[in-house]
Amino acid sequence: MYADGEARLEAEHETLVVRPPFGLSHAAAYDVVRVGPLLDAIAEDHLVGVLLVRLGGFAAGVFQGEELVASKVGTRNVHGRHRAGGSSANRFRRRREGQARVLAEAAAETGVRVLEPFRGRMRAVALGGDRTAIRQALAASRRLTELVEPTTSRFITVAEPRRAVLERAIHEVYAVEIVTEAPS
């Protein structure tokens, strides 16, 4: 059965629910397993943006299918947390917050620069890195917030947003979700 953007393949002992990353427009019920519409949806290429931000670095890219067609990667120094207390700890915290703000602004500016030429043509934008850093980058730029709509439902967790990591991130964007359910 194809409905609600997913395919349900029912067998005697289990049901597989398959959700392509960008849903399924096909809707129908069959007496036999028909995977053609599902395979067509999975094989379809899309224009997709990716924005990865973590403290210390950021990467923005646009993919046509799995091919990276535009990208920019950058770094900004953000010191780690300081464990000691006292007035110097507060000074260190303020410096770290300032560095994080500079990184968020640079990531937002880069995201706008990379994604803007593809405005209105991207199927979706995938976000990743660190959730707090992404929120800070989006808060730093209203234009970026507008550009990343709609976002994919999956958040890509990465250790360091570098070019090689950006190039591999598209595989997570196109990953198909498969859930096994017990028969009802």
Image (cartoon, helix red, strand yellow):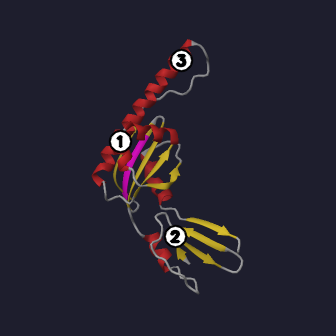
Q: Residues within 10 Å of mark 2 (few under 14, many from 20)?
A: few
The amino acid marked with disc number 2 is Asp
> First in sequence: mark 1 or mark 3?
3
Magenta run includes residue 21 = no
What x and y, as percent, mark residue 165? Answer: 47, 48
Name the residue carrying label 2.
4
How many numbered marks have been drawn onto this rendered protein structure? 3
**Secondary element type, mark 2:** loop
Q: Residue 142, which numbered label?
A: 1
Q: Residues within 10 Å of mark 3 (few under 14, many from 20)?
A: few
**Secondary element type, mark 3:** helix
Going by the image, does 117 lie left or right of 171?
Answer: left
> First in sequence: mark 1 or mark 2?
2
Nearer the observer, 45 or 180: 180
Dominant secondary structure, magenta: strand
Name the residue carrying label 3.
90
The amino acid marked with disc number 3 is Asn
What x and y, as percent, mark residue 124? Answer: 40, 57
- Compute the Cα span from label 1 to label 2: 32 Å
Where on the picture, by quarter, is residue 52?
Answer: top left
Region rendered in magenta: 58-63
Residue at the image point whose x is 45% and y is 56% from the top: 170
> First in sequence: mark 2 or mark 3?
2
Q: Residues within 10 Å of mark 1 (few under 14, many from 20)?
A: few
Nearer the observer, 81 or 98: 98
Where on the picture, by quarter, is residue 107?
Answer: top left
Going by the image, does 23 lie left or right of 123?
Answer: right
The amino acid marked with disc number 1 is Arg
Tell me if residue 59 comes above or below residue 33 in the rendering.
above
Residue at the image point whose x is 52% and y is 22% from the top: 93
Q: Is residue 75 visible?
A: no
- Compute the Cα span from label 1 to label 3: 30 Å
